[in-house]
Amino acid sequence: MSLFDKLFPRRKAASDARTFFKVLNGYTPVFTNAPECIYEMTQTRAAINAFARFASKLQPEVFGDAKPELENALKFRPNPWQDTSKFLRRIAAILSVNNTAFIVPIETPSGELTGYYPVLPQMCEIVENAGKQYLRYTFENGSRAAVELEKAGILTDFQYRSEFFGESNLALRPVLDLIQSQNQSIINSIKTSASIRFLAKLVNRTKTTDIIAERDRFAKENLSGLNQSGIIMYDPMFSELTPIEGKPVIINAAQMKSINESVFNYFGVSEKILQNNFSEDEFNAFYDGKIAPFALQLSLVMTNMTFTENEIALGNKIEFSENRLMYASNKTKIDIASQSFDRGLMTINEVMDLWGRPHVPDGDKRFIRKEYTLIGDLGKEGANEEVKKNTP
């Protein structure tokens, strides 16, 4: 059985539906995977990969008892082909490239939810069949399948015209053209400077064939491996023979910085994040501005595609989060651990997580100091014992 058949075992009924779902603004609800090639540029791929790399560290947690079996699937293997890290990284990368990412539920023939898979269709349409809405996917190989809209996951970025899908990356096209033009200019300049080494002027030679023949002869005898002396000799047929000094191509630093900043601003990633050279405050800014919104949207999307309205009302949900304190300075970690542990705010294992250490037996217990005294009882004998009686 192919991957397609495993993902869509019973969802082909609406694949040939011809009725489009009508939206308020009249915009046709169609997503197209436009070949804008933003993943083929060095700067854009680096920015996309940096975001996807940090997004892959998010930790899923399932709340409620409606589908407890999904917790292990989400934590380790959301589908038979990807672990959780690859699953999250691919969703983040697809969202960055297309501004729309689709997640389809993996179900048994009887309809039991067993996992999730991110798909990359060439086109996606919202259609109606028998009064029910479907997401109809068309893949690059021509295969088509439909998933119930209420069971499918859609993540978007730069969403404006469409009520369901994100915008294209046409706004980035001028920057991509600049990157391409600059790269080609550098390549051509290097080729030219490396290939032309002498400027020679022939005397009384007007035929093109003579000029070409003399050029090839001179190059063969003087510039090839045949010349072991290091000396160039030429006869009076050359009135001038001027060496050309090859100069390295220097990139306009200001222009390159402007282009890179345009890319970084578009994707919400700084240069220090790309180079893993960030400070605690710089990571917190990146987390709050880029990772946290993605985690929130992914949590809501997967909650809504997994649970019914009644199950959600009873507290069932899926959340993705990351321990950002892992990126804090040692001083901050010490301060947090010392101030939180003896107040019962952190367990031993949570402190171990802070330092990236393995858990210890009975490490989930909480402790609190009990030597506190009421201000009015300072100096009185037995004051601490009275506090202990009233301290939970």
Image (cartoon, rainbow, N blue to C red):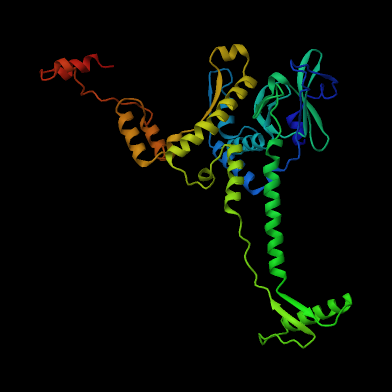
Q: Work out whether residue 223 can be spotted.
A: no
> Residue at 44% across / 39% down in the picture?
327
Who is closer to the viewer here, 148 or 98? 98
Expressed as whole percent of the image width and height from the top left, the position of residue 315 reads 53, 15
Q: Where does the image place residue 252, in percent across and percent down from the top left?
A: 60, 54
Nearest to the observer: residue 59 or residue 225:
225
At a point 75% along the width and 86% down the height, the residue shown is 234
Image mark count:
0
Taking the image as shown, residue 355 lies to the left or right of residue 317, namely left
Q: Position of residue 76 (x, y in %)?
A: 57, 34
Q: Residue at x 72, y 71 (%)?
A: 196
- Viewer-proximal residue, 108 or 136? 136
Q: Nearer the viewer, residue 264 or 275?
A: 264
State whether residue 264 is above or below residue 339: below
In percent of width and height, residue 210 lies at 87, 79
What is the quadrant of the C terminus in the image?
top left
Q: Is residue 98 above or below residue 308?
A: below
Camera sees residue 231: yes
State which quadrant residue 84 falls in: top right
- In the picture provided, is 102 more to the left or to the right than 209? left
Position of 83 with respect to 371 (left or right) is right
The quadrant where residue 263 appears: top right
* Quadrant placement of the N terminus: top right
